[in-house]
Amino acid sequence: MLRNRNFMFLWFVNVATTFAIELFTVTILVTIFEQTDSTLLAAGTMVARTLPAFLLGPVAGVLVDRFPRKIVIISMDTIRLLLIGLTVWLLQNDTAIPVVGFYLILVGLSSADVFHRPARLSLIPSLVAHSQLVSANSFILVSNQIGLAISYTIGSWLILTLPMVQIAIGIALLFGSVILVASLIVVPKQQKAKNSDGRESFRKTVVEGWQYLRRHPIARPLTIMETIEHVPHGIWTGAVMLTFTILALDANVTEWGYQVTGYFVGMIVGSVLAMVMERWLKLYPGRIIVTTACVAGIMTLAYALSPTVEVAVIIAFIFGPPFAMRDVAQDSLLQGTVEQGQLGRVYATRQMLSNMVYMFAGMFFAWLSAYFPIRIIYVIGGIIYIFTGLYALSNKALRDSKMNPDVEAI
């Protein structure tokens, strides 16, 4: 797999864009929180990042399936480069960008990601053999988590030591390199043919995608489960977690960064385990998905009772491995069972529904934190996770699903 030049180019694009966007978001979140001392306004960054997926999801899925995915990736990264360049220009001409201005920039960046993420995920099975899907997704996930861990650690430190304009310039340079590398990806011609769906009307293509998702025995329950799961995911937004760190643990922004980094380190460990246990993930992906949902509930309840930052960091780390293995199992199941011509729409729809729920849940929990003890909010989240696991357990097709490495997507 490491000798596959095209996959490695896609790997770089995936990791570099993930790191750049997260670093930029962290610096904005901390800046808004320090300027306003408001959990709700800081949580607005989450709304700015999730709202575009809700509004543009159906359009994104159709375009990703209709047009060459490489072109979609390059186009979206070019748009993000221009937006970061605009940020640099504004910071040089006006040292105080208003909160609304930050929100609008994040909306633009996230709108591009609504197209970019399904395109790059759907491109993976075009560049690697079906039998290598678990390894490919594990490799990308472990690299992403390293980037995320670095972005949260560095981001919370950089914003205290460097002007934001310098951070933005660095991110713009990173996006420039991403565009150059993405242009080097060569997609096999036979895969390009599978993606051509341009003769059908836009409306028919959207309806067909929804019907396909509704009928699919694996994609449907996975989408329902992930959508429900994004309700408790709302307690893990940066603003709510930062509030927990300050109010419940009597700590600061840096120690909030330690917890987030601990989680990403755990994800890195889990991604490596997924590569080592590749055969096991192929045989029992459904059981892994069910089990990790229940584990998430138990660990969330434990986090709610954390007496110190050190304990919270340890719990955050323990969260990582099962979640990493779950993510690899989900992506590999989708890429291995969904038709190539439908994969972009399936990913975009999942992203649309999940982000919609995540956005409202995050804002709701941020608002609730002003009226209820922050620890109670995490207890509520833990209980919802457990109910999500029970739903997954009740679905036989998902519970008993497995990957046959010798069979292409149905």
Image (tube, rainbow, N blue to C red):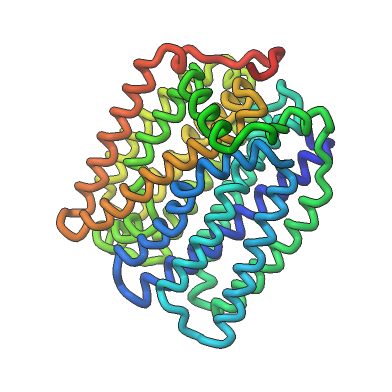
Quarter in which the N terminus is drawn = top right
The answer to whether residue 234 is above or below residue 192 is below
Q: Quadrant of residue 19?
A: bottom right
Name the outermost residue toward the left: 371
Callout count: 0
The residue lying toward the viewer, choosing from 405 and 241, is 405
Q: Quadrant of residue 87?
A: bottom right
The answer to whether residue 48 is above or below residue 164 is above
Q: Residue at position x 26%, y 52% from top?
A: 364
Q: Residue at position x 32%, y 49% from top?
A: 360
Q: Residue at position x 40%, y 59% from top?
A: 256
Q: Is residue 174 visible?
A: yes
Q: Residue at position x 60%, y 20% from top?
A: 337
Quarter in which the C terminus is drawn = top right
Is 206 displayed left or right of 374 in the figure? right
Is 183 displayed left or right of 352 in the figure? right
Q: Position of residue 111 (x, y in %)?
A: 54, 55
Q: Position of residue 59 (x, y in %)?
A: 55, 44
Q: Position of residue 381 (x, y in %)?
A: 28, 41
The residue lying toward the viewer, choosing from 46 and 3, is 46
The residue lying toward the viewer, choosing from 14 and 324, is 14
Q: Is residue 311 visible?
A: no
Q: Position of residue 323 (x, y in %)?
A: 47, 35
The residue lying toward the viewer, choosing from 248 and 143, is 143
Q: Quadrant of residue 143?
A: top right
The answer to whether residue 277 is above or below residue 138 is above
Is 329 displayed left or right of 96 in the figure? right
